[in-house]
Image (cartoon, rainbow, N blue to C red):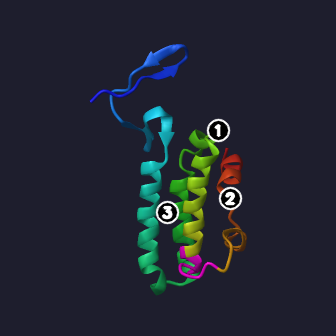
Amino acid sequence: MAFPPTHILSQNITPAAAAVLNLGVSFEENFKIYRKHVAAVFYHIGDLCRNRRYISLSAAKPIATVVISSILDYCNFLVYNAANKDIAKLQRVHNCLARVLMRFLLVFIFRSVALLKSLHWLPVHYRNIFKI
C-alpha cells in the first residue's frame, strides 16, 4: 500500500508504513501522534474504573498518578509544540482520569477544572511546560 509523501526540509519523503513506534509513542502519517497513545491510556483508565469501587481514594490516587499519568507524561517533549486539537485530546483523557478517580462518572455537575484543582493536577499544556 502506497502512502502519500510528506514534505520535510525541501524533500519529499514517502513513508514505508502508516504508523511507526519511536520510544514507545506511535507516530502516524503526517507526524500525528496520540491515537494509539490515547487508546493505551484509556485501557488503563478502564481498569481503574472497574476496580475503583473496591479501593479508597487514598489508594486510587497513587495508582492513577504512577501508572496512568506517567503514560500521559511519557515523551511529553514530543507534544510540546503540538497542535491545540492534539493537546485537547490529551486534556480530555486527563479529565476522564480525574472523573474516574473522584467517582464522578455519571454526574457532570462538577467541571473538570475544579476536579483537577482538587487533585492538585495541572492541565496537560502546563504539565508539559513544567516537565520540560
The span picked out in magenta is 100-108
Q: Could you tell me which residue is drawn at 54 percent across and 13 percent down?
A: 10
- Numbered circle sitting on residue 123: 2
Q: For the residues carrying marks 3 and 2, which lies nearer the camera in this image?
A: 2
Dot 3: element? helix
Q: What is the chief secondary structure element of the magenta stretch?
A: loop
Q: Which residue is most to the left? A: 1
The image shows residue 132, relative to residue 120, as above or below, that is: above
Q: For the residues carrying marks 3 and 1, which lies nearer the camera in this image?
A: 1
Q: Amino acid at mark 2?
A: Pro
Q: Which residue is most to the top? A: 10
Dot 1: element? loop
Q: Which residue has dot 3 on it?
A: 67
Percent across and percent down for residue 4 are: 39, 26
What separation in Å lies between label 3 and label 2 (alpha carbons)?
18 Å
Q: Callout 2: 10 Å neighbours few (<14), some, many (20+)?
A: some
Q: Callout 3: 10 Å neighbours few (<14), some, many (20+)?
A: some
130 left or right of 16?
right
Q: Could you tell me which residue is drawn at 61 percent across and 53 percent down?
A: 88
Q: Which residue has dot 1 on it?
A: 81
What separation in Å lies between label 1 and label 2 (alpha carbons)?
15 Å
Q: Amino acid at mark 1?
A: Asn
N-terminal-most mark, 3 or 1: 3
Percent across and percent down for residue 80 are: 64, 41
Q: Nearer the viewer, residue 28 or 121?
A: 28
Q: Quadrant of residue 90?
A: bottom right
